[in-house]
Image (cartoon, helix red, strand yellow):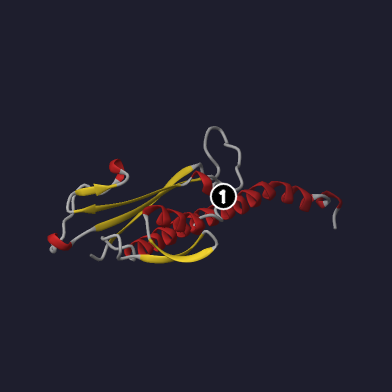
Amino acid sequence: MKRTEKGQAAIEMALILPFLLWIIINVVNFGALFYACITISNAVRAGADFMSMMGASPMMGMHYETVGGNIALVPITGSDVATHVKADIANLPNASAATVLVCSNNNGHVQKPLDACLATVTDPQINTSVVGQVTVQYTYKPLLPFVDFMGYPLTLKEMQIARTATTRLIQ
């Protein structure tokens, strides 16, 4: 090794290390973003599937629940659907800030919450149609934040993920 080549590897490593660190941080953040999107989508679909068992009439959908220490057959409600969805997204960071909206629309008669449900039902079987909708809104925050470089973000910023699933309820 020549005397002039001493320390060359250390200088090359010092030059490439920030770039490698940036790549690793972005791989982790994009992986977490994709995981959050997939988890939210699966939770919304599972909630709509659970809601479809609810049925349009109160006696259609029933499930087993512990009531006063005894197991009882109780009707499925919108809060049961929301609890089911929140349990599916509980492992996400910031999951407590996610909002779950569950509503149904029976031929234009919107049921809770009024401001976030479907406006109309467009269905060929208009007299037998009850549509249920589950919506989840989640704020993704990067797992590994990184500094901006000259005003340009070097990694993902905080962003909203919203997914909706619609299902027809049995009457």
119 to 166, vertically: above or below = above
Specify the quadrant that holds the N terminus: bottom right
Q: Amino acid at mark 1?
A: Pro
For the C terminus, the quadrant is: bottom left
Q: Nearer the viewer, residue 142 or 51?
A: 51
Res 37 seen here = no
Q: Is residue 68 above or below residue 143?
A: below
84 sits to left or right of 102: right
| Count of labels in the image | 1
Residue farthest to the top, as pictured: 151
Which residue sits at x=45%, y=65%?
A: 72
Query: Toward the viewer: 1 or 17?
Result: 17
Residue pictured at 29% horizontal, 40% vertical? 115
Q: Quadrant of residue 43?
A: bottom left
Side (left or right) of 97 relative to 13: left
> Percent from the top left, x then y, of residue 168?
26, 62
Q: Quadrant of residue 150?
A: top right
Query: x%, y% of residue 107?
Result: 17, 53
- Image point (40%, 58%), residue name: 44
Q: Position of residue 134 (x, y in %)?
A: 35, 54
- 2 or 104: nearer the viewer: 104
**36 is higher (above) or lower (below) than 94:** below
Q: Residues within 10 Å of mark 1 (few under 14, many from 20)?
A: some
Judging by the rendered image, the residue that carries numbered circle 1 is 93
Is residue 32 visible in the rendered image? The answer is yes
Q: Position of residue 8 (x, y in %)?
A: 78, 51
